[in-house]
Structure formats: C-alpha cells, structure tokens
Image (cartoon, rainbow, N blue to C red):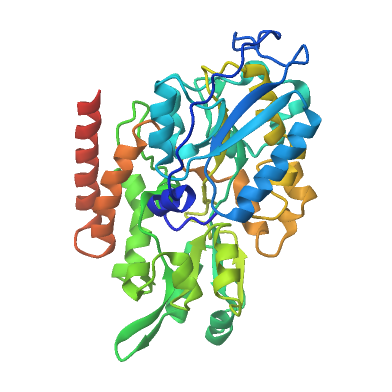
Amino acid sequence: MMKKSFATLTSVLLGSVVVLSACGSGDSSTGTPAPGGTPSGGASGEKVTVTLAGWTSSADEKELLQQTLNEFEKKNPNIKVNYEVIADQYMDVMKTRLIGGNGPDVFYLDAFEAPGLIQTGVVEPLDGYVTADFDTADFEQPLLAAFQTGGKTYGFPKDFSTLAMFYNKKDFKEAGITNPPKTWEELQDAAKKLTKSENGKVVRYGFGAAPEIARQMYMMKAFGGQVSDDKGSATFASPEALKGLQLVTDMHNVEKTSGEPKEVGAGWTGEMFGQGKASIVFEGNWAIPFLQTNYKDLEYGTAELPTVNGKKGTMAFPVAYVMNKDSKQKDASWKLLSYLTGKEGMKTWTSKGFALPTRKSVAAELGYDKDPLRAAIVAGASYATPWVDKATLPTIMNNFNNQFIEAYSGKAKLEDAMKKAQDTANKEISAAK
C-alpha cells in the first residue's frame, strides 16, 4: 500500500466506488451462541455466508487476499466468504451501512477511524472470543493497542507500516557521508551537505518533509507533548509539543535544507525522492514497490528514523479486521477474523511484501526483520506511535494541518499558528458535544 500523506492515503487505498448489496444478514442459524450472544450457523453442517468488506490498492493485492480467503474456505467448508470491495469513500459507506443495520460481518478499520467508530457502538468487542492458541502476545503491542480502549479489544491488526528513513546512496557518497544519520542533529548536518543549489535556487533538498500531523505526532511526543488530553481537547500547542515541531520548521525556514514536495513539483515525498529532488525522506513500506516500479535505477537504502531528544520514535499506520456488533454470524465471523489475523492466514497475506505482518513470529518467518529494505520498517513497530488518538482526531487533524503548513512555509510563527489551530479545534470540539 502506498501512503503519500494521510489525506492521500485515503484516496490511494479507496479508489472508485463499487455498488454493494446489503450484507451481514446471513441465514437463520442453528449453531451455538457466540460470545456476543447471537447464534451462528455451521455447527450442524449448515453452510453460512460471512461478508467481508474492505478496500484494495492493486490487482495483485486483491488476488493475494482472495488466495488467503480460498485457503480459509478449504479449512472451513461450511463457511462461504463474500468479499466486497468498497473502493471510494470507504468510511462514509461503512458508517451509513452499519448505522442502517446492513453492514458486513467483518471489515477493515484504519486506526485513525477506530476511536470514532468504536464510540458509536457498532463494533463488537473481541476479548470473549480469544482462545489461548490465538497468541495475542505475538502482535507488536503498539499496533494492537491502537484498537484497544476501555480495557477492551475491538480489532486485531492485519498489517501495518511504520516510517523509515529512505536515503540516496549516490548522494551520500558524493557528499562524503558514510552512514545514515542516527540522531536529529546528525540529520541536520547531513541535510546541509546534501542540499544542492543552482543559480541561487535549490534543486535538491537534503531532507524532503511532509508537514502534516500524521507525520509529526512522534516529534511532539519526543519532548513530552500530546495531541490531545484525556477529554479529547487539543493540546498540540503546548511548549513540549512545540519543541518537536520547531525542529521540523527550522530545517525549512532557518537552515534551508528541507523542502516539501510541491516546492519541487512532486506530489509526495516518495516521488520527490525518486526524482532525485530530496536525498532523504521518511516513508513507509508502500514506497518500496513505487520506487521499484517507477525508478528502477535508483540506488537507495533504508534505516530507522533518527532519534529525537535522545529517544527512538516513528509513526505506525495499522489496519485491523473488526466485527460488526449486529452480525448474525458471529461465530463464523470470528473464525474468519482469527484466521486472517492468525499466523497461517497472515503469512499468506503478507508473503509478497505488499503489506507487513503485525505478528512478530510471521515477520521473522518471512525474513522481513532482516530484509535489506524492510528491516528498518519492521524494527520501528515495537516503539512506534500509532496514527490514532481520541475520537476528536479528525477535527484536530484538519485544524493542525491548516496552520502547520503556514508555519512550515514561514508565513506564520509556529507558536502563533499552533495556538490558532488549537483554539479553533477546541471550539469545534466543544460545539460538537
């Protein structure tokens, strides 16, 4: 999956709409009541249908998921999986269908959307279904925690990516840099050496940045800052949060060694990197197939992100399988969900590297923890900040992004811009209560 920015991630993942039939109703069931209370079919040999809804990024990815589902059906001949692709406005479609009572039995849920949807009561808690052989300790805990709230687990992560540092080996060699920077201070120094100008104009930035909150949460956290408080009110303008954000804006406005994609005619930092207009970018697993397809001759490597304030950090973007609370086939739905997020199903699904496994054992078995390009991405999962917060995050994101770009571009002081964004976000949050 390719993630250009949080906003463009949605469009890349979701594509164009498919008209879907109503699902989740299932056949009348005669089986044993599932932990959620509703009986599920299949116990007496009756074949039942479980609907699964999600998005897809490519034909190859869709084919790989179908292979995984076929393997599940062979092992569970009494369960038929009806896989539906919602290719446009995924969450809008899902919310409408779930609230209307005709949602799918099992569906994808992005961490960013999880708190808000869980709050509506349409997602089934899964703790009562889990058995000892499911091995929840095998999941990378920050990725699992993204779908836990109030002491309950509402989803199990199917795949993820963190951000890693992509660096141009040729540029590094020409600048006399032997190793990728390990601290923010080393990144600043490297970016100065890597930035290239012609006729007074920057033609290659040392560092290509994405000035948005989805990429900056861990920077704020490094100094003790938080996006919001326990009540969901925005707090990203605190002195602690500003310390992390200042590092990002200073590289652009003071050191002149960082630029964003639009400054060099690129659409996102992965493209900026591929075109040779940035020597270092922070990107995820989705950038690897993009670069392999579009920039075959590019010599690059990856490394974990540099430490900030002496602390390791990165962002994680997990997606989970969750169950519809109104599903009529809860037992069969759990069998599907637990297979897809279990070791066997996850191994098939992540076998080609389109997505990365959230289970440590599967990542090791497939060799991703030692892969030259993906090892750094996998390593970050254990300490990453997931792209999730309170249910107010969408409101916070919109206001943060609107003002942070003003500060990054030098049109406003960082403190003033973030204070304005925070105040506006909190007014909107209060009005929505």
Please tell me which residue is depicted at 35% across the width and 74% down the height of the picture.
Answer: 265
Q: 303 left or right of 400?
A: right
Give the quadrant of residue 301: bottom right
Please tell me which residue is depicted at 28% across the width and 58% down the height of the picture.
Answer: 405
- Residue 295's place in the image compared with 89, above or below, is below
Question: Could you tell me residue 202's position as x and y percent?
Answer: 34, 81
Give the quadrant of residue 393: top left
Q: In front here: 4 or 223? A: 4
- Residue 232's place in the image compared with 385, above or below, is above
Question: Could you tell me residue 416's position as x and y percent?
Answer: 19, 51
Is residue 39 among the parts visible in the rendering? yes
Question: Could you tell me residue 131's position as x and y percent?
Answer: 74, 20
Quadrant (top left/top right/bottom left/bottom right) for the N terminus = bottom right
Q: 18 left or right of 232?
A: right
Quadrant (top left/top right/bottom left/bottom right) for the C terminus = top left
Question: Could you tell me residue 150's position as x and y percent?
Answer: 49, 20
Please tell me which residue is depicted at 65% across the width and 52% down the height of the picture.
Answer: 378
